[in-house]
Amino acid sequence: MTQKKLIIVGNGMAAGRMVDELRARDAERFAITIIGDEIHGSYNRIMLSPVLSGETTAHSIVQKTAEWYANNNITFLGGVRVTGIDQHAQTITCDNGNQLDYDELIIATGSRPARIPAKNQALAGVMAFRTLNDVDTILQRSQTAQHAIVVGGGLLGLEAAYGMAVRGIKVILIHRSGWLLNRQLDKASGKMLEKVMASKGVEFRLGVEIDTFLGEGHVTGARLNSGEVLPCQIAIIATGITPNAELGLEAGLEGNRGIKVDDYLTTSHPNISAIGECTEHNGQTFGLVEPIWQHCISLADRLCLNLQTAYQNTPVATKLKVSGVQVFSAGEWMTAEHHREFVYSDPARHIYRKLILDNNRLVGIVFFGDVRDGQYFFELMEYGVDVINAMPQLLMGRAFCAQLPEIQLQPDEVAA
Amino acid sequence: MSALIAIHLEPTEVEPANHTEQTTCCYCGVGCGVTATVSNNQVVMVKGREDHPANFGRLCVKGSSLHQTQQSPDRLLKPQLFGQDVSWDEALDYSAQKFKDIVAEHGPDAVAFYLSGQLLTEDYYVANKLIKGFIGTANVDTNSRLCMASAVVAHKRAFGSDAVPGCYEDVEQTDVLILVGSNTAYAHPVTFQRIVKAKQDRPHMKVIVLDPRRTATCDIADIHIPLAPGSDAYFFNGLLSYLAEHNALDHDYINAHTQGFDEALAIAKTQAGSVHAVAQACDVKDQDVAEVFALFAKNVKVVTVFSQGINQSSSGVDKGNAIINCHLATGKIGKVGATPFSITGQPNAMGGREVGGLANQLAAHMGFDKQDDIDRVATFWQAPNMAQKEGLKAVDMFQAIDDGRIKAVWIMATNPVVSMPDADFVKRALEECELVIVSEAIANTDTAKTAHVLLPATTWSEKHGTVTNSERCISLQKGFLPPPGETKHDWDIMSIFARKMGFDQGFNYQHQVEIFREHAALSALDNPRKRAFDISAMADMTEAQYQTMQPIQWPVNAANPEGSKRLFSDGYFFTPNNKARFIAVTARMPVQPPKVGEVIMNTGRIRDQWHTMSRTGTAPHLLGHAAEPYIDIHPEDAARIGVKDNHLAELSNRGARFIGRVNITNAQRQGEVFVPMHWNDKYAASARADALVNPFTDPICGQPEFKHSPVAIKAHNTQWTGFLVTTQDVVPPCDYWAKITAKHGYKFRLAGSDAANFDDWLQQLFPAITDWQTLKDSQQQHYRAAGFIDDTLVVVFNSEQGNNMPNEGRWLETLLGQIPNAMNRFAILAGNEGKGGEDEGAIVCSCFQIGTTAINKAIKQGCDSAQALGQKLKCGTNCGSCIPELNGLIKRATGQT
């Protein structure tokens, strides 16, 4: 039996995991080719922050080496960019002119940093924090840089700021919103986070944006829309991501911000699948790792086992990877009029725990500083458990409740 | 250097040896002997004294806790003048000059002393001598007026002398024990224990309780007569006519030793001529009445113990005599196991009566009714200004303070702002008085707060002198600890004051024994069996004999050198013709019946508290039994006002309010409530029961009607309920609070009738705290907060909307005043240690929230790689960031094992 040809375009975390899931089911079924525009094998992008802060090394986060691909009969084309897909001919074209044909194509091109409206972004030193290459560059510049600016007070921006601060660089983080992690935390917890980050050496300018970067060739500073001018030798932009959907969309696949996939990760063309941050599913795009693992499982089940394992969009909890700072946020984070909230707050110890209830059921979790039982609350939320009888004790954690709310599977899930 | 170390290593130098002292308890009238173990100037343990006839080794819970009430944070240690610390000279110069000025301008009746059954006999003697013999007025009364005055006069009318005929042995050796108006189980616990034991040993012994309430004492009762409040005299008048009817009289005794029987019987017959009439009047069952009457009639050995239920009444004297009449009519007196027995409330109420420390007594069982007595005492004292007439009794005294007739009052060892009837009136009267001197051990009693001059007195274990208990037994209450701070003994304070007033002679005592000898000599003066109180055999006592005095029952004279267990055994009484007197008693009900909708408020003691709590309130475990002011109420009444068990209700009368926690019980008669008398402004927001008591008094003895106050009642409008645990003694600004002493501070139970902004409320109450943690609910159903100063837990507050108290979690109290570790600090607002589940430890895997506890456990069970841990716990299988930490934990664990 001849092997079918499977091409995976992109070699980020989704591709890496995809290979594992395929091989775990049927190692012989496909002749796999992976094409990635980075020269490294698949690495754990989430761990870039610890690499930057020096808590781990670049070497240790590479999960698949060239040797590994060779040993496992996988063709790995590193440093190569795919420029086009011909869905009728079932071929792809690469930037080196090569053309490859496939039986099954998986697009896993990921995403890129979102752009900001600031002027003069082309200066050297104004950069993203996305790849091992980026980290290399930052680390090199860190040797001489004294001041850095990070734009974006989301997870990545905070991690980047922290990573440089621990290397002794004076970091100022600029964030458009009035508080940090404003898509995960409410103002009270966001302000608490600000204090904690400040104690780790990060300074903040909130509610402002960069008007223009300053410098000749290399960045030397930035002017804010408040008029303030800050010096910097590095400026990292981490204001979010944009799906790398162009390859698919230009090939005629359906989609808007991302490449549209169904519950089984099939695009609008049956031989082409897509996973990860380049996709959109029911209008939603992705930025965290958990749903992507589910993409890989669902797709591997279909390709290898012909099993219909539907991928479902579920809420995802957010965690911050800054040493000593614990954040757990899921669902709603801002309390609305019709909600009931329970809030524990210990400002001196930087602990904040909020549960948002709607009709006695959890719809939001915002934990900061002490995130115990976050996953448990997450499950209570997912299963729509009535928790009112356990309140307010439950807010503090399971251990403090004599009677815990019971998590009962929904009838249809039991049947399944 | 080395020499010093050597000394420190000497064990005997480090641990001074304990020693024991024989003394008596300072609480109730049982007067138990106490063996106190002393170490480092602290009483470290107390035991009942085995050889004391009051208790033979027993102690009740209050007595057993004496050593735990030694360290009051509120102890008064320095004299104060207008709130400022001053020297003794300044305080007493001012006081004496002021007394002199007022007496000079307005006469001696413009000054008064208000004393206490807590004073020792020697203190009492000096007070009585000073005011009656030297200042020149009999305006000296005592809180004994509130408890014993009825019995005193009943005794005097019947026996010609204020003398209790029997002794504690009689309650053990009787065949029928009738307890009337006495919750012996709570108020005289050791006597109760003796009764319990006696009933076990002699099962045929019958115990009958007459009390509107089914009290704890009823647990051992064969018959409980829940009679209508105040109807007691109908019952005993009925008994007298029953005895006559059923041929149960001792005619020989009546003829030989009594007078006035026919008149007494005649009135008894008209008022309560049949069992049925009695049952009607008392609102009880015919059959129960008949049974008790028959038991009384058939048995020779009958003891009738009566206490505050009889005394605290507008007809208390008559009630006492109605009881005594029955014993005289049957000769059941002065015999083993047969006596009427008035049991006193206070440790030295009897001693106060012996020295004559009441307005209507003179001294040593002499009275103002005989000029001979007045002259005899004046001569003995060499008194320059001998009072010639009775003074004002307690209620009248405070009335006179209010209307300005009395301009200076010296209050010693008592708290009338809490304990007097119409107590708010008393408070206002004192606040308006020209000079209020208060001698106290505790700085901030409700009464001390009204003082211009505050004098620090010694207290139990420091003061030294004699007390007399309910069975006439004189014991030495020993001072064996040095007076703390600048405290002085009461007799010493008054002696210095007397000299400062210019009375150079008569107050130069150097030792208590000198006072005691003088007291004993006065009892002997012209007393050839004329007055029952005679301790002439003790008049020449040496100091050494005094210091080792063994308990002895008066009279102690030539005829009875070893004392006297019983009086009147020979039918000799102290009336002019030496015959006992029957008193014709017209029974009457309390002064004011309740109006429609009102309930009758009864007041009394609880088991573990003493009087106004200034001592017992400082021992946490004494507040375990009853921690808050409460209201016992019948289920029908509770339903009528719409209040549930454990919720709050309020009583009101005379503009005063009592808010207490409702205890719904069938032990109450319908239409009647019971409240404890102890709570006061130091321990509760609004629970001074006596402020609701009308100032109705017995016309003969002046004792107030504490047991019967018609009051309005309603459910309290509680919007929120909560508790506060704090190291600081605060006054929470809310409708209801009750302070409960905790080991490291206080717990307050709280309730409010209006919504509060708790953030502001707490900040105002604890302005020094900036470090708060809170737990809030947007619907305001719950609010919790904890406050810290320098990381030390100072306060925890927990409240809920509605009537239900949030779970208090005693665990919190253990953290108070401590610096809690991170885990405990987090747990504070949860209110428990979090043992409901395992502490997960520090979170290692953020993705799956796996902590060190689970990981270490899995490693122990054989997971030796991050991968193995991932398979078991899922940790590290998502983002993988924690794998280095997982490997670290494996290394550490395997390296250790």
Image (spheres, helix red, strand yellow):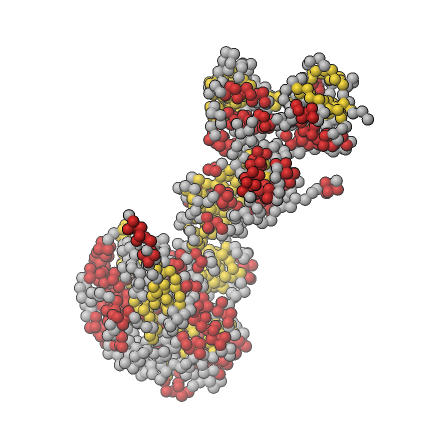
Number of on-image labels: 0
> In the rendered image, which quarter is residue B430 located in?
bottom left
x, y percentage for residue A21? Answer: 70, 31
x, y percentage for residue B878? Answer: 63, 33
**Would residue B442 be visible to someone looking at this image?**
no
x, y percentage for residue B417? Answer: 36, 58
**Would residue B457 be visible to someone looking at this image?**
yes
x, y percentage for residue B31? Answer: 37, 69
Q: Which residue is depicted at the point 50% across and 81% down?
A: B294
Residue A110 is left or right of residue A367, and the answer is right
Q: Residue furthest bottom?
A: B252
Residue A342 is left or right of residue B52, and the answer is right
Quadrant in which the C terminus of chain B appears:
top right
State whether residue A308 is above or below residue A405.
above
> In the rendered image, which quarter is residue B95 located in?
bottom left
Q: Which residue is depicted at the point 46% across and 61% down?
A: B675
Q: Residue furthest right?
A: A1
Q: Which residue is depicted at the point 47% across and 25% down?
A: A168
State whether residue B468 is above or below residue A36.
below
Q: Which residue is depicted at the point 52% across and 55% down?
A: B647
Residue A23 is left or right of residue B626, and the answer is right
Asked whether A404 or B702 is in front, the reply is A404
Asked whether B713 or B439 is in front, the reply is B439
State whether residue A351 is above or below residue A55.
below
